Amino acid sequence: MAKVIGNAIPNMPWEEKPAGCKEVLWRYSKNPIIGWNPGPRAARILNSAVIPYGDGYVGVFRADHKDITMHLHFGTSPDAINWDIEPEDIKWVDESGKPFQPEFGYDPRLTKIDDEYFIMWCTSFQGEPTIGLGKTKDFKTFVRLENAFLPHNRNGVLFPRKINGNYVLLSRPSDNGHTPFGDIFLSESPDLNYWGKHRRVMKTANTWQSLKIGAGPVPIETDEGWLLLYHGVVLTCNGYVYSFGSALLDLENPSKVLYRSNDYLLTPQESYETVGFVPNVCFPCATLCDAPSGRVAIYYGAADTYTGIAFGTVDDIIKFTKENNSLAPGDAEIGR
Ligand code: BMA
């Protein structure tokens, strides 16, 4: 059994696999956990990040307002299912304490490193999308750090520890629209200010992930490698379809892909995934993982409208990633 490096989360949301289910993942029976018009300004809450905090959970949520602008809202929950989400968006300050509010924000991820929580999201760099990086210790003061990257970039995901002395971030260089391309890249930084040693981790592949791919939740550390869930997009006659699959990255050199699933793990299938503001989207941004049992709850945005949860175990996902491996020998060395 793969050993997960991390903490126990004994009270995380969980349902046993339904009898007869042959898939690696199964959906929460009460999905979606957040539906239409969840707040006075929020029309839809989707593509959001959650993390254990204190006796319960906190989250940074993507809330699309009723004027269709995208914002980040903070929320709390005793059980990571029923959320109390603030009606107004998170107010940021810069490192000197001055207000520093982006025009928009979406698709957040949350990483804990030591006693700090880092937020990565798609922010506005003078109106253009790129990776935003911020931090908080108490989820009351949110400090926006330097712009990590030039526009245009999205899907920034920070690893939960330094690797070989550096912070490590995955990202997906893009354009300023509904980008019709995109691979996953890795960058390193000694201080979260200066980023370099850029490497390409994975290219698109000729299947459900043929148009673009992007890192999903913060990778889960195991003794077999970093387990990465990532979304992949195919262009169909009816537009983009967002599914997600898995890859295992080398522990000390995570730009090296050890295994990569050929099939998706989850694709839009239920009505809350296939019908909504943007149909046919399953977009994971967070997991809760109980290290001793390897249980995983995956939080994903559905149809750019809802928030859903899918369950699985690290062991089964790794087994699937290896047995369903699409890498040919040599593919793992894309590098620079
Ligand atoms: C991507 C991102 C996601 C969104 C998806 C489908 O480009 O913006 O936030 O879920 O498109 O609309």
Image (tube, grey):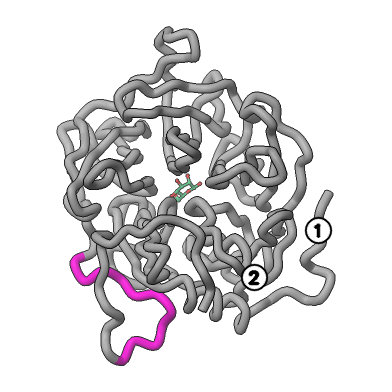
In the image, the segment drawn in magenta is: 20-30
Judged by its main secondary structure, the magenta piece is loop
Q: Is residue 45 above or below residue 92?
A: below
Magenta segment includes 27:
yes
Q: Position of residue 309 (x, y in %)?
A: 31, 62
Quadrant assignment, res 173:
top right
Q: Which residue is mark 2?
A: 260
- Which one is in front, 274 or 139? 139
Closer to the camera in the image, 54 or 201: 54
Residue drawn where x is 50% and y is 39% of the image: 113
Residue 302 shows in the view: yes
Q: Secondary structure at mark 1?
A: loop
Q: Look at label 2 and name its amino acid.
A: Arg
Q: Report if residue 80 lies within the magenta region.
A: no
28 horizontally vs 177: left or right: left
- Residue sitting at 38 percent across and 23 percent down? 142
Above or below, 280 relative to 38? below
**Can you identify the residue that label 1 sits on?**
334
Which residue corresponds to the image point at 38% horizontal and 71% vertical from the top-left?
Answer: 293
Dot 2 falls on a residue whose secondary structure is strand
Q: Quadrant of residue 322?
A: bottom right
